[in-house]
Each structure stands twice: as structure tokens, then as C-alpha cells.
Image (cartoon, coloured by chain):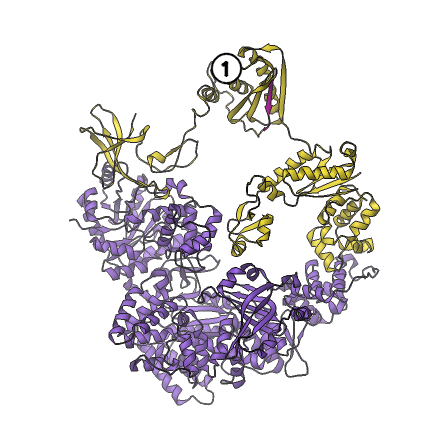
Amino acid sequence: MLWACILLPQLAMDGVLRHRSDADAPLALLGGSPQRRVLQAVNPAARALGLRPGQSLTAAQALTRTFATADYDVAAIERWQRFLAAWAYAFSAQVSLHYPRCLLLEVQSSLRLFGPWPHFEARLRAELTGLGFRHRITAAPTPAAARVLANAYDGLTIPDSALLHETLGRLPVERLGLPREVAAALTRMGLHSLSQLLALPRDSLARRFSADVLAHLDTLLGNRPLALDFYRPPDVFDARIELNFEVESHQALLFPLRRLTADLAAYLAGRDCGVQHFTLYLEHRNQTASRMPVGLLSAEREAAMLFELPRGRLEYLQLPAPVLAIRLEALELPAFTPEHRQLFDERPQQSLSWEQLRERLRTRLGDNAVQSLGARADHRPEHAWVEQPTELSLPPCGPRPGWLLAEPLSLRESSLRILAGPERIESGWWDGGDVRRDYYVVETRAGQRGWAFRKVGDGGPLLLHGWFA
Amino acid sequence: MSDYAELHCLSNFSFQRGASSARELFERAARLGYHALAITDECTLAGIVRAWQASKGTGLPLIVGSEVRIVDGPKLVLLVENLAGYQALCRLITQARRRAEKGCYRLLREDFDEPLDGLLAIWLPEGDIRHVPWLRGRFPERLWLGIGLHRGADDTARLRQLLELAEDHRLPAVACGDVHMHARGRRALQDCMTAIRHHLPITEAGAYLFPNGERHLRRREELVELHPSELLAETLRIARRCSFDLSQLDYQYPHEVVPAGHNATSWLRELVERGAQWRWPKGVPEKAWAQIEHELALIAELRYESYFLTVYDIVHWARGQAILCQGRGSAANSTVCFTLGITELDPMRSDSRLLFERFLSRERNEPPDIDVDFEHERREEVIQYVFHRYGRGRAALTAVVSTYHAAGAVRDVAKALGLPPDQVNSLADCCGRWSNQVPSAERLVEAGFDADTPLLRRVLALTGELIGFPRHLSQHPGGFVISEHPLETLVPVENATMAGRTVIQWDKDDLDLVGLLKVDVLALGMLSALRRCFALIERYRGAQWTLATLPPGDTATYEMISRADTIGVFQIESRAQMAMLPRLRPRTFYDLVIQVAIVRPGPIQGDMVHPYLRRRNKEEPVEYPSEELKPVFERTLGVPLFQEQVMELAIVAADYTPGEADELRRSMAAWKRHGGLEPHRQRLTSRMLAKGYTEEFTSRIFRQIEGFGSYGFPESHAASFALLTYASCWLKCHEPAAYACALVNSWPMGFYSPDQVLQDARRHGIEVRPVDVRYSDWDCGLEPTGTVQPAIRLGLRMIRGLHEVDGRRIEEASQQGPFADIEDLCRRASLDARARERLADAGALHGLTGHRYQARWAVAGIEPQLPLFAGLAAPQEAPVDLPLPSVGEDLLADYATLGTTLGPHPLELLRGQLKAQRCRNSRELVGIAHGRPVSIAGLVIGRQRPQTASGVIFVTLEDEFGLVNVVVWHDLAERQRRVLVQSQMLRIDGHLEAADGVRHVIAGRLTDLTPLLTGLDVRSRDFQ
């Protein structure tokens, strides 16, 4: 067996740099508490300025101000590791994420496909470099040894265990992958390399260190197997139905669509997840497929709804050519939180649920024509609502009109009756839109009730800002 | 026009609510012609003394009150009618505060079951009419319904409803403004404080913001427009009833300090007479008697006997516990305090030149001030004694009002305005640590901000308003108020953060104004070191020294001081002090008093240091600005150095009355927080110019006054400190081993690390012996050498990470008999693995097992003994072959585990390489002439950026022979910032400056030599 270890020493930084156009500008990733920000990773340009991981941001800024910062995102690191595992899966069926920031590949079995190891390794390096990830690669008969060697070497291949013993023996104890306190204890006994350690009587070592330490050394040397979990590619839904004949009408597409969406619903239910975006491909002869993305406002998995949406859209789609096959692809399957429903919830036969109505409206009028509304805690009427549902508590306030005008209109009518007011509103200095107004509830001659204001200290005419129902 | 009194008004002592200071509120209310102003901060009287001051300043009557919210009850404004009402209010607030966490309160309905006479209540209805019957029962004929109209949705309807409510319950209604700021212009600040209070960005705080800016002190026309005149007239009826004034408070000293059969006067006299016999066993000098009589007469006239007796009581108790202490402050330098044992400074000493009158004067209405320093490790015992002796109800700590500095203000404001955390941090970094100034535009640009964006302009404007505002109450480190009657009849008491402590709601300045006396029980590390040193000497030599008996005027000691050989002594150990010593060359005690006071912001900012030095060295004639100032400045050669001299100057040269001078003193201490020096500038300048003083002199004096503000350092304190300085110097000079040992045992304290103290001792020829479980106690100790000076045996306390309990057990076990081997040690001292490893790594087991590596191997092999096999020998192990640590490895391990090394100094190991690089050592500097180029290398043990020096950084290097002072000018520091900040070991190429025995290397180029000693743990005091 030959195991390759691909160590990704700058995974976090490389993941961030991939998305930056100015990858050569100094950049530091920050972690730690808001009070004490600490540099977690720096790119080479930042390193050249003297910045080091572990420095506090304050100390770093004492050195230089000319560097950019971004968040050190632990979740992103794991994401990138999985991303690379998916990449490595193409080269080996046994890819393990056993160690953080590192990939283990069983490569012996792949040598026939990808050529002798030096070629294989070169290809891995070329692709990683192309993807923008710095790396160190070592290979050894055991996965643990490959991992430990990557601490000290890059490009080293140890084909057999005799050479492995010799090479590991020279490694300093700090690099052996032992817990830090064990390595420190060994150093403080004057034991600096593995060979020194192995020269000692085993029972004397066993008396002084926990069983894990000897077990780890045995694993390294191949005297004990390492139990690995292997990577499995993530779930996606991708199903395709070939039609028996060339379909030109929308109607005829509904049946296969209903099957696909029902399959999707079943698949989602089986995995206890939902779908928020999926794509339908309508395949034509000699032409690129027509692509129809479908997006929902939240993750769903009910078959009827999954069908209803693309159905509505399908009707508007201009088919450029007859359809030969239909394919549904859902790449992201987020977790699904079912809505709480009463057991005996009444749902009249013919009525649509609110969700269905909402989605149907969106389908008919366009995605942006239907929005959720929410309230915002702001005393200024024009800032007191947003196009998103919110859960903020609101300030107690007086009566507000149901219809707020987009722009206040000046009220020229002379026979206005003032019903209430002035209600003074002075707020909003923080965004440059400070208002100082006295609001009145007014009644027109026609009996309409309006909401009008005048700037504080301004004798001008009232400006109408809204109508009460 | 209708008269009006505002009865519901918050000041900025309703933290994060009130957006104006009492002064601003009173000034505006007076300008608007209000009849009276109530300050009703929420469940607190912390701001009431300041309000009282503002009231006296403007002539507008103050009504004392408080806004409170009762748990499961209504919201009320309580107003104080008379003294009984004031006491009831103090009690309510105390009860509410004591049962809640610091900063919060819980006022319960049952708190109102006790008498509430003299307390008026305004009910602020919030739809809770069910409380009315209960309220009527508690406040018969003293309950009103408060109506606040703030141009809300429908004030007309609201007013009608409230009036109906009042009618229904037959309650009189009264207008009250719920004032949160003095003027509408504070609306933004008030909104911002609301956001800060709720920890929300302002864009999300809308639910908590007021809809408009009406909650300010409105013009009376506006009020008339909104309210029926009856509501306004009612405010006056209430205001007329509230006749209470804080001057009616009657503070009395505790009675315990006077035994039965005596009164305070006779008892003080008796104690002083006894003390005089004790201080002068060979007969009290005539002069001393005369002085005592004089002082006692003055004390009796000012009725301060009980104060002196209270301080005596504490000091007397501490002395009984063998806790070393030393008083300082205006009254401390009296003969009375000397005889009472409060201070050790003999006022009869010919070289003290101190006069009691200078500190306690009949005309100046200044309370006596005695701060007592105790050993820092035992101060808590003293504090608990005071609580115990007088009881919780009668003794409490003073509060300190924490105010917003620039950094904190900009941080809170920027966060409230939604800046991201990293930008908030960098904005705060743009402010100096204690700065009270909005960061400058240049500083902001340097940090990458554009000061002209609207957002940043808003941040800076609000920051400017917020700076100086009170933020919260914290406890004074040791200021006690002790009273005959329960304190809660004088001032509310609340919980401190530390368990077992209570704090009154007033700070030191407030106490002065109300006439409460405070005793400061402070902690001082040097006293711990001195007491330890005396004990070490007594044990080693049998000689008993005390602060008072050390021989004064010792030439060898002053020689040592003049050489700036002062590492580890009190006050004159810092780099700036050391640079001054060879120029000032102190010869007498009073020289030390000056030395202690001169290297401080006051004299430095006033440009007083160099004139003094020149005059002292006879390089310029001693002159006086005028003949009348000669007596004031004679003792400091015509140069004003002390805070007291500035006050005397104000009296002599600017015709201040003693009262005005006292006001100046107060303003000096407080101007950074409250401002208020401007009137003095005008008064002083105009009067002095009129009397013929030069403009240059007056402005210099004024800069100095401002400098005193931040670190006021009066002569009276300097004198007490100088005594400790002399004592520490004498001990360092004559008992260097004991002194270094005591310092190390008292660490953390002072300016230097144990490593530096021990290196210094070794340079002075003291032998230092390693930590060894066979001989070391927990503390460092002295061992005979056959010469005059004993050797220092390092104690187990030096071992990093070793717990004191483990160390003490080893100490105990070794006193039972020597350890046979390491098993024996571990068993008898019951050491766990952690302690064993620490001992092994530190080399403390060398005598039992051999070198570190062997020790670590051996202790790791010790297995826990099971009771069944107790006494059985452990199975024998084959010996193993472990390498020998190299010198370098030992050095690294020494620093890592002990923080010091007894082996060669790191620089000694590197000297060969450094010599090849043509680096000199610190000893060779003496032979190099002023102005010559020089290269030098050393460990960086200090980097300082003094606030008084613009941009220059002082670096202290240490090599095997001593310290080298390096000056890095601003430009170089900027150019080589990285090397300067990061290096642990530096090479400096530059040139030497030498004058008056002071040597500096002026850096021209810095080179980082840290790689030479990778891993060495040298702790540098960075920019402190």
C-alpha cells in the first residue's frame, strides 16, 4: 500500500485568496474575540511586512497599517477541505479527511490509471496549483506516516518500511504528531528524536506515558492499523426522463414533469431535506438544452408545490424546438423545517394554501413583483417598513395611515379640518435623513382623512403624506 | 408669563439616559427663568452633590429627588421635602440597590411600608390605575398625578384622559417634563446613549428612541401653550414645600475612637503625649512640645480631633498585626501624626523643611487629608478590620465615578452608529490611553479613516459630547467613609463588584463638599518589601530596624543615589529618574523630596525641570519673579515645583483668598473631567499681569497647573514618599542581599522584574544560589557566606507554575528532615505530577537526581503509591542514558522556568560573536567620549514612549555588565518600527551622549539580533 498525504498548510488563506483579484496585496485573516482580534493567517505579502499568525491585531497595526483583513472562517475551511476531497475522489476511491487541513489518498490502487507515482504526484500538484491551493505532498506505506512526514518534508516518497523507520527516526519529537504536552515532556527529558525514544526500554516508556503515545508510535511505524473514515461524495438529485416522441406542447410535458418532481419529493423526504433551487433542462435535438431555473422563497419538499411552480413557468416558456428529454437537477439540498400544522386543520377542497397562492402569484407576475413586507423600528414613517419580514419590536406610536405616499404632496385645499395633532417627529440624524416634522390628522371637504405634516418651525403649507382607509 | 418649576429631570448620572450634566441643566433652567429644578436621577443620588453645586452656582433652587420604577408597581418621581424625606429616600435607594447586582436595582412595594414622611410622590401613570389606592395609603396628601406632554400622537386627547383620571381619583395633577437633556441639541446624543444602553446599533434601536426631542428644558412659552395654567401653578406649590438643602446633613464621627471618661480633645492629647515619650525616649525636645501644642490647638479649633483619632485607630490596629504602614497627605506631616505613629517622618529633622501650616490651615476651608499606605499583600486585612469595627451600616468605601475617556466614548459611539468591530477598535486605538480629546485628524488619516465622511463626522461630534460624562460607579481602592449614624441616612449605599464590599454613591470630591471625612486605606508594594527586608535582617543579624530608626543623612547612601545606582528602590528607579539623579545629585532628605516630585508631568509640562537643575548646579542665578514670592519659592530655588507652591503663589501674587486657592486646588484635580479652569486662567493672568509679572511667567505657571491636573503631586505626599525612598536606598546600599531578596519575594511590584533585580545584585557581588528542594523555602532566603553579605538562596516561588501550597508543603517536609531521594520528596510533600515536573524542569531536583533531563525522567517514573503497598520499594528500573543539557539549553530552560538564570548572562555567551561584529559592552561605554560613534548590543528590557516627550522612544538594553539607555528619535522609530517593536535583542549603531555622568546612546540604526537567542524568554515592559 502506498498512501499519499496532501497537506494544505494555507487552506484558509488560499480559500480566501481564490476570490480576490488582488491576491498579491498584503492580507491577514482575523479571528479571536471582538475585543482582542488575532491574526490567524497571513499571505506572503503580509508576511513580508512582518505580520505573523498569532499576533494581535493591535500589535500588527503597530507594525504597519498597509494590509487588508478578512474573517478567518472555520466553516469555510471545512468547506474547502470537502471541496478538495471531491476533487481527490477522482483519483482514488479511498480519500480520507481524517486529519484537519489535509487529505489522505490511497494511491497504490490508482497507479495503473494515473501512471507511476512521480507522474501521478506531478499531476496532483499541477491541478492543486491550478486550483490555487498551496500544498505539500508525501507518500509512505502507512497513512499516519505519510501525514507525519508532511510535517517536515515535501515531495518525499518512502516506498518501504525499512526506509520509513530510518526517516522517521530522524524526525524531531515535536513533529511526530504527538500531543503538545507529550512532545514538551520528551524534550525536557532531553529526548529530541524518535530514534532516541525508540532506543529506550518500552516498559520504562509505558510507565511514563499514556497508552495513546505508544499506540501512536506503533501506528506510525505500521505496527498497528489506523482506522479511517472515507469520504463519500455529497448527495445531489439529478434525474432524466427520455420522452418517447418529440414533444412540442406544454401539456405533454406536464406528465414527465410531475414524475420528476414527485421523485424529487420522495428523494428529499428520504433524506429529510428540502430544496430551494433546482433547474429543469429541456433537451432538444442538435441544440443546447433550454434551461429553466426554479427558485422558491424557502426550502420546500411537498410534491404538489414542487410541481406547481415549474408548471406555471413552463406555460410561459417559448420552446425553440421539440423536446426529446427532460432533466431535473438539484445541487443543493438544504435542511427542511416542516411547518407546524394542526391535525384537523381545515383546508377546503378548492382553496389554495397561502404558500401555493403566493408562489402562483410570483410565477404569474414575476419573482420581484411579490414581496414580503415587514415593519422597522424607525420613527420616520417612510423608514418604518422594509421589504422583508422582521421580528423587531416597534415603538408605540399614534395612528398611521394604511397608504403612505411615496412622495409627500402639497395640500392646497383651504377648508381642511384638523382632527388631531401636532404629533412631532424628530428622528433619523444618523443616516443623514434627519426629519423634524409636525404631523396632523386632517379631513378634507370630501370627508377623506389624510395624514399631513409641516416642517417644525416652517409656516408653509401642509404636505400630505398618506391616506387613512 | 406663568412660573414653572421642573420636577422630573434626569442628569447624566442616570447613566446612558440623561444627556446633559447638572451644570448644563441648571444654567439653562436659570436662563429660562424657572423657579426651581429637581434632579431626579433614576434610583440614585450619585449626581446630587454636583447638582447642588450647580444650584449654588446659578442661584436656582435644587429639589432633591429620584425617579423609580417599583417591581410590580408604578413608576414614580419621589421628591424630598425635608431631612426626614431625604433619609427615607436614601433608605429606599439603599434597599433597592443592595438587593440587586451592581448597576441595577429592585425596589419592592414592601420597601414603602416604613415611614415615608417628608417624601412627596408624583405618579406617572402607565395604564396602571390599580396601584392608586396603595399609593394614596403610602403618600397621604403627598401624591400627585404627573402629566408629561411631549407632542405625541394626540396630546389633546391624552391630556383630557389624564385630567379625568386625576378627577376620578381626586388627585391633584401637576406638569412634569421627563427631561433628559438641557436643550434640543442633545437629541442625537440622547438617541445614541439609548442605543448604547440597549447594546443595539442605532438603526435597530428605533423601538427605544424617543420620537422627538421634546424632553428638554422647554421655554416657558412653549409650556404655557401645551399645559393648562393650573398644572404649571401646581409645580410651584410642590417646589415651595421642598425646602431641603444638602447643607442640613449632619455628619458625625464615630464615637468608638474615644474611650469613656474622655472627650475627643483630651483623648487625642493623651495619645499624643504618650506617643511623644515613645518617639523621643531620651526626652522630648522643647521644640517638639511647642509644635505639638500649636498643632493641637489648631486641630481643636477646626474640630478635627476625631478624624485624627479614627486614622490612629486603624494604624494602631495594623501595627498590632505587624502590618507596615505610612501616612501621607496634607495633615500627615505633622508632629501629631508622628507621635501617633501615623507617619514615620520626624518633623523635627533638620533636613525636612516641612511646616505643618503649609498643610493644614485655619483660613483654608480644606478638610484634613491623610492617606495611609499599607503593605499591598495585607491591605485587605485592614479593610476588613474597618468593616468589622464599625459595621457594614456605618463604614463603606467611597465611589469613583468612572467617566468616559476618549477611547471608551468613541468605541461606544462608533458601535452604536454601526461601525464594524475592527473599525471600532482602530478608532479607539487612535485615542491615547487616557486621552480626553477627540482623536486628531492626522491620527485618523494615519489609521486609514477619512475624517470628512458624514458618518465619521457624526461619530466624532458625539464622541466629543460624550467625553467626560459619567459612565458608571466603581469603588475607590481604599477610601473609607465612617460615620456615627448609619450611612444610609446620609447617602445611599450600594453593592460593589467585589463581594463583601459596599460603596456609597458619592465620590471623593462630593464628600469634601458635603463635609464627610474620608480615610484612605491604600496598598503599596514597597511597604511589603521593606517589612520583609527588616524581617530578613533581623533573622540574619538580629538587628532591628524600623522606618524611623534608619540612620538619616547617610553619605554612602546619597553617593549611591547620585550614581543612579537605584535599580529596585522606591520612586527614583525609573529610567527618567535615573537620568536625572546624576544631575541633581541629592545630598539631603529635602533633595529627595524634590527628586520624587520633579520627574512628573506638572513640572515637566511647566518647563520647570531644567531651570531648577541649572540653578542647583549654579549655572544660572537664583532669582525670584518678585520679592513677595521669595518665601514661597526659596526652598526650590525660585522654581515652582509643588502643587502647594502654586496655591501659595495664587494667594501672594494674584490676591486669591485662601478659599479661592482651595477652589483652584480642586479645579486642578478635576479640570480634565469637568473643565472649569478657564475662569482661573483669566483671574490669575489678569491679576498677575496687573501686578507686573511677565506674560511668559504666567503662562508657564498655567501650563504647570494643567500638568498638575493629571498627576497632582503635592509636597506633602512627596515628603512621605521620600522617606520610603530613603529607606529603600539605605537598605540597598547597606543590606543589598536582604533588600534584593525582599524585593523578589514581594514581586509583582515595582518597575523591574526579579531577573533584573537579581542580575543587579550579582553585579554588586552578591552570590545567588539556585533553587534546590533540599535548601529552598517558598520565599527566597539568606544563607551565610563567610563574608559580610549573605548569599541569596532562590525560593521555590521562583518556579513558574508551581503552586504556593505545593511549595509550602515542601518547605514543611524539609524542616522534618532531609529528603532521602525523589520518591521520599514526592511522598512526604505529596506532590502531584504537575508539581514534580515543574520542580524537575526548574532544576530544583539537581541535588537529588542530577541534571534536568534526568530529573524529568525520574519524576515521570514515580507511580502513585497504593495504600496496600505503602512502604514497599518501587520496582527497580534499569538506568537509562540521557544526554547532558548544553549551556544554551540550560539557559533557555532557566528563563522558561525561573525567569532568570544563575549561569552566564545570555550576552556573555554571545560576546564572542558580538565582539567580531565590533559591538561594545555597557562597561566600555564609560571610556568613550561624548559624541563618538558607538555600536552596542543587548537584550531589550524596556521600551517606553513618555507622554511628555514627543514621539521619542526610550529603549533600555541589558548586557552582562549592566543597562544601557538608548534614545530612538521619532523619524528612526517610524523608519525601523518593525525592528524596534519586535526585537528581543537589538544592536544599536549610533553615537554616545554623555553629560553629568549620564550616558545615552543615540540610535542611528537598529538591527534585530533576536535570531541569536531564539526561544529566550525575556520579558520586556513594552510601552507602559
Residue linked to disc 1 = A315
Q: Position of residue B469 (x, y in %)?
A: 37, 55
From the viewer's perspective, is B145 left or right of B546? left
**Residue B623 in which image quadrant:** bottom left
Q: Chain of mark 1?
A: A
Q: Position of residue B573 (x, y in %)?
A: 52, 73
Res. B197 visible in picture = no
In the drawing, does residue B232 fall left or right of residue B927?
Answer: left
Q: State the residue lying farthest toward the left.
A: B1
B445 vs A455, nearest the viewer:
B445
The answer to whether residue A133 is above or below residue B587 is: above
Of B484 and A83, the residue lying toward us:
A83
Relative to A161, residue B861 above or below = below
Crowd tier of the residue under label 1, counting other residues whose Cα lies within 10 Å: few below 14, some 14–19, many 20 or above: few
The chain displayed purple equals B
Letter of the chain in yellow: A
Of A385 and B149, the residue lying toward us = A385
Where in the figure is residue A411, as x and y percent of width and height? 23, 30
Tell me the magenta residue range: A326-332
Q: Main secondary structure of the magenta part?
A: strand
* Mark 1: amino acid: Glu
Q: Is residue B583 visible?
A: yes
Residue A154 within the magenta-colored segment of the rendering: no
Q: Position of residue B708 (x, y in %)?
A: 38, 69
State whether residue B725 is above or below residue B45. Answer: below
